[in-house]
Amino acid sequence: MGGVAFIGLGNMGLPMACNLTRAGHRVTGFDLSPAAKQAASEGGIAFAQSALDCVRGADVVITMLPAGKHVLAVWEEIVQASQPGALLIDSSTIDVESARAAHALAAAKGLLSLDAPVSGGTGGASAGTLTFMCGGSAEAFAAGKSYLEAMGKRIVHCGGAGAGQAAKVCNNMILGATMVATCEAFVLAEKLGLDHQALFDVVSTSSGQSWSTTNYCPVPGPVPASPANNGYKPGFAASLMLKDLMLSQEAAASIGAVTPMGAAATGLYQRFVAEGSGEMDFSGIIAFLREGTLLD
Amino acid sequence: MGGVAFIGLGNMGLPMACNLTRAGHRVTGFDLSPAAKQAASEGGIAFAQSALDCVRGADVVITMLPAGKHVLAVWEEIVQASQPGALLIDSSTIDVESARAAHALAAAKGLLSLDAPVSGGTGGASAGTLTFMCGGSAEAFAAGKSYLEAMGKRIVHCGGAGAGQAAKVCNNMILGATMVATCEAFVLAEKLGLDHQALFDVVSTSSGQSWSTTNYCPVPGPVPASPANNGYKPGFAASLMLKDLMLSQEAAASIGAVTPMGAAATGLYQRFVAEGSGEMDFSGIIAFLREGTLLD
């Protein structure tokens, strides 16, 4: 018995599960998509007939799913079949309320649980360099850490149930707002006759510095690895940034927090995605700011 | 003859001029405020009777004044009395259009000129660790660099006339927007039950990273030197951040650039300053976001 059950073998889940097998874990996977079966097999992952079959006898169960409703539907089912003492980890990026509800489902059956959303994208998932932001008890974190280390390079215990999702949503709200502000500044600089490299040289070493400039500069040139040098192919798709910004606004509304910059960024990405640019990297919003079409 | 003329011996100009004397330059100063005379004398700075007297025979003239109108009024006068071959440097933070008009005044008299606004605040002015963002010809930059090095540790040539002001206004627009977004995230985290240190640990090493978190964290604790640990005493006063944001919005309007996040940040700092918090550090806006009073 033992081993890891992995439910949700998509663009993120599949390479994460493969890294668990490479680290020596016996992994049984499940996904509703039949296409996942072949890919799982190539990665050394046994494919179960159902989510319930997948989790039977597993020491650790990991879910990687699109949204809170999927996570709750799967957890309601699998908590029935998970063995006593099992640890359930949800690495999906979902709303804080659903994450807490999932913890409650596990707790009602005496199971350990973590919310553990990731940052690092599909590249980090393949390379095993994800950051995991974890919420849950110290016991659950201690039980899960070595498994997460097989898939990531930074495993952070942020606090109790839901704290991982809270940290991710806060981080990504800052990211979205900062990226748009950075894009605005590069466009303003262009129109003022200041070249990109000059603004980069000032900002990257001054008080305007951020990851959005230093690691992910939204114009071609200064940071060769940034998506701006590759036609704004993601990277981190605008549709996923919008998903995270929407989660931030839901969280803010649910507890009466005031997030005017987060709201402004959300509105801009809604426009950007509605205009058909959801599959573009999120830094590609600079083109819309340059044209001024967003404010028509 | 020779030496440096320094016009504007206020909170920034006085310590800058003192650093020039410490570097061995003969400095003649002028300020409309009589109080400056005593302080200048203590710093080894000769005090002139007028701006015109101040610049006569000087190799380099530096102005450090509140706004574009002051700079243009002084430059219109002093270009008449500056010796042939003199270099005029304006280190005030002013609008790009006025900076270019000042360059044109100098050029019409065959004088070299730089716009060279600074970052680093009064602390950097005293310590001689300012960053100078310079706009002007290569010849003017070469002529001025050694003088600026007596007052700063980073001297950047950003481009032609006005490029220094453009770089500063773009940097500070990013700064204002990023700081507000960072404050929003810390407040959202509080209300979600995520503690400050946990959010700092995630954001400072993730894609939400910025100078606003890493060097100037708006909550007490994670960054001991940040104004949040000192009752939000500046630091960088909210009124000065508002001034720079207003300059960014003037610049954007003058050339048709779209800056929705910059505009949102400007509106928030207008509210914050209007409520009497202009002398508070600009990171103190977190208190207003926490109370939600800004959106009443």
Image (spheres, coloured by chain):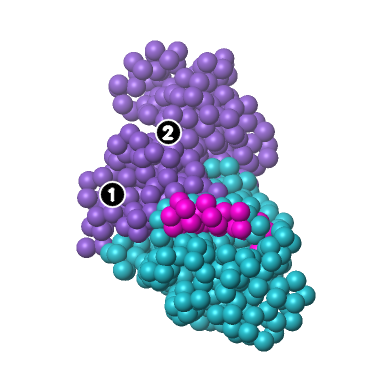
Chain colours: A cyan, B purple
Q: Is residue B104 visible?
A: no
Chain of the residue displaying label 2: B
Q: Nearer the viewer, residue B209 or A37?
A: A37
**In screen coordinates, is B126 left or right of B140?**
left
| Segment colored magenta | A125-148
Question: For numbered disc 2, what is the local secondary structure?
Answer: loop
Q: Splitting the image into 4 quarters, where does residue A19 fall? A: bottom right
| Quadrant of the frame with the N terminus of chain A | bottom right
Name the residue rendered at 74%, 81% in the picture: A38
Q: Residue at the spot x=56%, y=62% of the render? A: A118
On-image quarter of the C terminus of chain A: bottom left
* Amino acid type at mark 2: Ala
Q: Which residue is mark 2?
A: B225
- Near-viewer residue (B158 or B76): B158
Same subunit: marks 1 and 2: yes
Question: What's under tag 1, amino acid-wise?
Answer: Ala
Quick one: label 1 or label 2, which is nearer the N terminus? 2
Name the residue tied to disc 1: B287
Residue at 36% of width from left, 17% of height from top? B39
